[in-house]
Image (tube, helix red, strand yellow):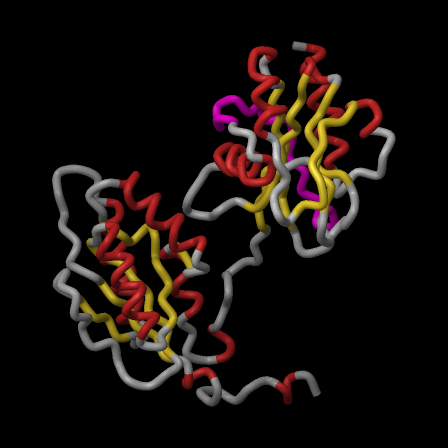
Amino acid sequence: MVLALLPKEGNWLMKLKYSLLVASPVIFTSGDNLSAATCMNLARACEAKGVQVAVGNGRKRLPALGRGGPRIVFIAGAVTPQSLLDVVQRIHDRGMKPIVVVDALQVPDLDDLHAVLTVLNEKSIQLAHAGEVPSLLGLNWNDLHMHRFAKADNTSSVAVFLEGGKKILAIKRKHNPDKGKWALPGGFLNCQLETLEECGAREVGEETKVAVFWYELTLVDVRSSPRRDSRQHVVDHGYSWFVPEDREAEVYAKMEASDDAEGLEILDTDWLLTQDIAFDHRLIIERALAMHTCA
């Protein structure tokens, strides 16, 4: 009975169309050619799957991307930050869905690309890597995969201590899961854009307005139980930051809760450990204090 519910081959799935847009041809140089090779391999993989590969010339007018839809357009090739923004916008304006294949982009400056990808990520433009594309190009039901193997999400959480560990910065959660409970600042890794340490530093800044550099964070632990987060399988990386005495006044002056938090307080660490703390953040606090004591 279950098998009878599966779509017939070539029925609904063939209505979804794919194209690969190589914004401009990649150039092989004497330096690092990894992105150029990735772009070429991606184009071959798409052609093997019968997907149209369109190559632009760097000008504003896009090449033909095929007719019919709905259509997903993978973006690769040589770009500048501004040309990438323009291409994504024009594809979106045509009613197509752009997916930026990050490791198949050849750019003059990786730092500039990082800034543009951050903007696209904030606008909910999907970023992917070349290894994910073939699994989305199945031309029948059995070949279609979101991922060849299921993947867990990654987060970073940071215990910010003051007075040598006697005080701690804590957020009262405004939304589920664990609405109303105290938690550490933290959040999801922006894949393709940052390291876990950078994620932790960014989340502290976004959720508390307190600035910390990624290299000031110390890894405490990694917790990966499939049931530690009710939403999905999330692997959390716990970090600590013992604020130097000469910067504590700055923390008190700048701290401010974000819009998605019910509150933000500096609490007695011992008192917080008597409360029902969100997720498994209690472990980060206890382990960070133990490491600090042994140091």
27 displayed left or right of 278: left
**Snapshot quadrant of residue 2:** bottom right
Instruction: Quarter of the image for the C terminus: give it.
Output: top right
Residue 178 within the magenta-colored segment of the rendering = no
Instruction: Pick whichever, 173 or 158, lies toward us.
Output: 173
Residue 224 within the magenta-colored segment of the rendering = yes
Query: At which x and y percent is residue 238?
Result: 63, 32
Instruction: Pick whichever, 80 or 266, lies toward us.
Output: 266
Residue most toward the right? Answer: 274
- The vertical placement of 153 against 287, above or below, is below
Report if residue 58 is visible in the image. yes
Residue appearing at x 26%, y 80% in the figure: 66
141 displayed left or right of 24: right
Query: How many marks overall?
Result: 0
- The vertical placement of 144 against 28, above or below, is below
Residue appearing at x 75%, y 17% in the figure: 166
295 displayed left or right of 43: right
Q: Which residues are magenta?
A: 212-228
Instruction: Quarter of the image for the N terminus: give it.
Output: bottom right
Residue appearing at x 16%, y 70% in the figure: 61
- The vertical placement of 147 against 184, above or below, is below
Query: At which x and y percent is residue 283?
Result: 75, 31
Query: At which x and y percent is residue 164?
Result: 69, 13
Report if residue 237 is visible in the image. no
